[in-house]
Image (cartoon, helix red, strand yellow):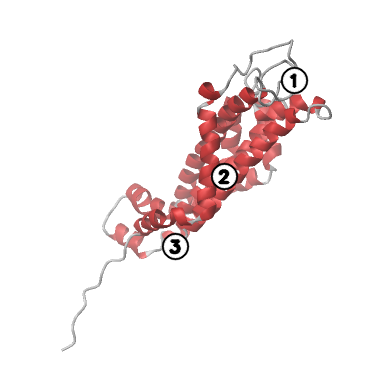
Amino acid sequence: MASVTTPVAAEPLTITRARGFRQRWYRTPPFVAGLIIVGIMVGLALLAPLIAPYDPNQQDLFNILSGPSSQHWLGTDELGRDEWSRLLYAGRVDLRVGFLAVLFPFLLGTTLGCIAGYFGGWTDTVVMRIVDVVVAFPFYVLIIALVFVLGPGDRSIYIAITIVGWVSYARILRGEILVAKRQEYVLAARGAGFSNRRIIMRHLLPNTITQAIVFAMSDIVLDILAIVTLGYLGLGIQPPTPDWGAMIADGQQFITTHPGLSIYPGVAIVIVGLGLSLLGDGLADLLRPE
C-alpha cells in the first residue's frame, strides 16, 4: 500500500529572506564594505561634538587660510574656521537631512503604491497620472524650483524631495503588488474574510517592500547630492550652519591656492556615496531569493 505524505506548508518568503540575511550578510563583501564605510562616516558625524577640536563657527582672523598643522589638521578657511571641525559638523547636518529626506517619500510612495496596485481602477489611474506628471520634469530642476519657491532651509528640502521622490517608490510597490495580489496566499487571505488593510499590511507589504528598501539606499545618495547642490547654490542649509555644498562653494574662489577647501568636502561626499552604493548592492544580493 502506498504511503500517503502530508503536504508541508511553504515557508513564508519574509522568513526565508530573514534567515538568508542572517546567514550570509558577513559573506557578502559589498554589504560588509558598505556597512563599514557608512558606519564610520555616520559615527564621525554623531561624535562630532566630542571629537571636533573647535566650534565649527569659531573664527580666528589672525590665522586665515592656514595649511594643515597640529592645531588645525586640515587647515582653516577664509575666516579662520577649522576645516576639520566644519567637515564633521557638515556631515552631521547633511547626513541627517539626507536620511530624513528619504524617509518621507519612502512612506508616502509605499502607501500610495500599495493602494494603487491593490485596488486598481480609478485609484490606480489617478495615482499613476500624478506619477507621470512628476516624472515628466527632471529631478534636480524640479527640486531647485520647489526650494526656490518655498525658500531656503531644511524644511523646504524635506517638502521638495518628498513631492518629487515618492513617485519612484509608488511605481516599485505598485508593480510588486500587481503581481503579488494574484498569488495563492493572498487569494486564501481574501477567502478567509480578512480585511483589505490586514491583507496589505500583514501579507502583501512584507513580501513586496524589499525592492523599495534596496532602492532607498541609492536614493539616499541622490538626495545627498541634491542637498549638496542646493547648498552650493545657496538654497540649502543656511549659514552659519556648516554644509558640504556651501563649503565647496566658499572654497571655489581659492581653488588655485588652497584647493583643499573644496576637495575635502568633495571627498567626503564621494566616500558617503560609495559606501551607500555598496550597501545597496549588498542588500540587493542578500534579499534576492535563492
Viewer-side label of 3, 1? 1
Image quarter of the C terminus? bottom left
Q: Which one is earlier in the sequence, the residue at label 2 or at label 1?
A: 1
Q: Which one is earlier in the sequence, the residue at label 3 or at label 1?
A: 1
Tell me if I can see residue 130 in this picture. Answer: no
What's the amino acid at mark 2? Leu
Question: Dot 1 corresponds to which residue?
Answer: 66
What's the amino acid at mark 3? Pro
Q: Which one is earlier in the sequence, the residue at label 3 or at label 2?
A: 2
Helix, strand or loop at disc 3? loop
What's the amino acid at mark 1? Ser
CA gap, disc 2 and disc 1? 33 Å
User: Residue at position x 67%, y 33% from top?
Assistant: 228
User: Residue at position x 42%, y 60% from top?
Assistant: 180
Q: Looking at the image, how many numbered discs can be counted on the residues?
A: 3
User: Residue at position x 33%, y 59% from top?
Assistant: 12
Relative to residue 92, is residue 58 drawn left or right? right
The numbered disc on residue 276 is 2
Extreme-left residue of the structure: 1
Residue 224 in the image, given as x and y percentages of width and height: 62, 36
Helix, strand or loop at disc 2? helix
Extreme-right residue of the structure: 256
Whether label 3 touches label 1, CB < 8 Å: no
Relative to residue 108, is residue 182 drawn left or right? left
Of residues 251 and 220, the one drawn nearer to the viewer in this rendering: 251
Relative to residue 55, is residue 116 drawn left or right? left
Q: Is residue 113 above or below residue 40?
A: below
Viewer-side label of 3, 2? 2
Helix, strand or loop at disc 1? loop
Image quarter of the N terminus? bottom left
Question: Dot 3 corresponds to which residue?
Answer: 289
